Image: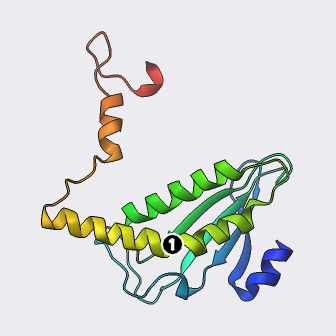
């Protein structure tokens, strides 16, 4: 945490996550120049026009970095939820690929975001333009997979997943 504070100066805040056991949490406010100012917005978001920076939240699990890797969450108030989901999934996949015992992932994840955020945004905008023009069908939503999992069980009754 001290190293992050030295690098990102006033943009690092520490907190305590309300978990059992309590986890150390680090919030890094990312530089506003990581994404272009021409951001796609969504009516699904509670957009705060004054917030043009992204945030990386890091939950340091017990034993980091020797035993368990941290958990990461990227958030930006002006990005659509679908784009945020893609960024977070890709970031977590990247973290899983490079996870090694004792390897400090935080700096790798910061580099990953710095190198890829603009590409994610650009790809998302291009895909949305193709969908709107009718040249690309919308990709199936994860909700459809959930619906498949929730189909009737063998005896014909719907049951919560936990009781199957």
Percent x, y of residue 29: 62, 80
Residue at point 45%, 64% (across, down): 84
Q: State the colouring used for the structure image.
A: rainbow
Is 71 left, or right, of 155 in this rendering? Answer: right
For the image shown, how many numbered marks are present on the structure?
A: 1
85 above or below 48? above
Q: Mark 1 points at which residue?
A: 117
Residue beneath the point at 31% across and 31% down: 148
Viewport quadrant of the N terminus: bottom right
Quarter of the picture holding the C terminus? top left
The answer to whether 145 is drawn above or below residue 42 in the figure is above
Determine the residue positioned at 29% across, 64% down: 127
Residue 114 lies, in percent from the top left, at 59, 75
Q: Is residue 31 above or below residue 21?
A: below
What residue is at 71 percent from the left and 69 percent from the top? 26
In this view, the residue in front, 149 or 139, is 139
Residue 152 vs 62, above or below: the answer is: above
For the question of whether residue 25 can be seen, the reply is no
Residue farthest front in this picture = 135
Residue 99 visible to an observer of this rendering: yes
**109 lies left or right of 14:** left
Residue 146 point in image, percent of width and height: 35, 37
Residue 76 lies left or right of residue 47; in this view the side is right
Q: Residue furthest top?
A: 155
Circle 1 crowding by C-alpha within 10 Å: few under 14, some 14–19, many from 20: some
The percent coordinates of residue 34 (x first, y second) are 54, 82
Q: Is mark 1 on a helix, strand or loop?
A: helix
Q: Horizontally, is 104 left or right of 155 in the view?
A: right
Q: Quadrant of residue 95?
A: bottom right
């Amino acid at each position: 945490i001290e190293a992050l504070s030295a690098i990102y100066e006033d943009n690092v805040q520490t907190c305590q996550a309300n978990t059992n056991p309590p986890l150390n949490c680090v919030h890094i406010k990312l530089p506003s120049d990581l994404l272009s100012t021409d951001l796609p917005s969504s009516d699904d978001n509670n957009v705060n026009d004054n917030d043009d920076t992204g945030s990386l939240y890091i939950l340091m699990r017990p034993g980091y970095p020797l035993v368990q890797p941290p958990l990461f969450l990227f958030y930006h108030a002006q990005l659509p939820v679908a784009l945020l989901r893609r960024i977070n999934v890709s970031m977590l996949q990247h973290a899983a690929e490079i996870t090694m015992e004792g390897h400090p992932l935080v700096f790798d994840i910061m580099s990953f975001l710095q190198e890829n955020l603009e590409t994610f945004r650009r790809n998302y905008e291009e895909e949305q333009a193709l969908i709107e023009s009718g040249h690309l069908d919308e990709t199936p939503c994860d909700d459809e997979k959930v619906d498949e999992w929730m189909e009737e069980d063998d005896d014909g009754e719907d049951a919560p997943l936990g009781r199957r």
